Image (cartoon, helix red, strand yellow):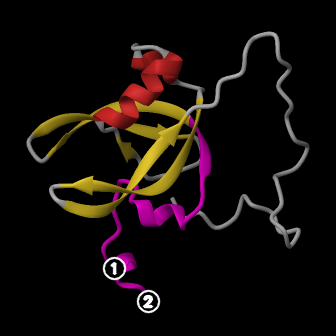
Amino acid sequence: MKFSEAFPSDYLRASDLQGRDVTVTIERVEFKELAGEHKPVLYFQNKQAGLVLNKTNGVTIVDSYGDDMNEWTGKSITLFPTKVDFQGRRVDAIRVRVQCQSASEPIEVPSSPPSDSNGQGMDDGIPF
């Protein structure tokens, strides 16, 4: 058993992404009391853990989907792990990316999940 499995969290950590970019669809935004602060938490379709929204990630989403968080429902974002400077240290973090298409471009929907170089499906085993 892994140490991290002994202390499960309701919220995503960078390690949960297993080094991969993961595209998710926003299901809802809820406000939670965390460390004495009222913070927005994003929840995603078919995922259990939420993403506590920091200002950097929030601004990225606002730039594409607008300031009204209620309008984010059903919108897709890509979560990716990275390193950031925090309180003088380099730490793991989750950042978001939004890839918008213009209304004139058709959106192609794959008939099956993408495969990796071994032909294995990529929609596997992300535990959150």
Residue 49 inside the magenta-drawn segment:
no
Q: Earlier in the sequence, mark 1 or mark 2?
A: 2
Q: Using the rendered view, name the quadrant where residue 41 is placed.
A: top left
20 part of magenta stretch: yes
Q: Position of residue 38 (x, y in %)?
A: 17, 33
Question: Which residue is rendered at x = 75% and y = 11% of the image?
Answer: 103
* The residue stretch that appears in magenta: 1-25
- Residue 3 percent location from the top left of the image: 35, 84
Which residue occupies 80% across, 63% down? 121
Label 2 crowd (10 A; few <14 / some 14-19 / many >=20): few
Instruction: Determine whether the residue tagged by mark 1 lies in a helix, strand or loop.
Output: helix
Query: Which residue lies most toward the top here?
Result: 104
Local secondary structure at mark 2? loop
Q: Amino acid at mark 2?
A: Met
Q: Residue furthest left?
A: 36
Q: Are marks 1 and 2 in contact (CB under 8 Å)?
A: yes
Identify the residue under disc 1: 6
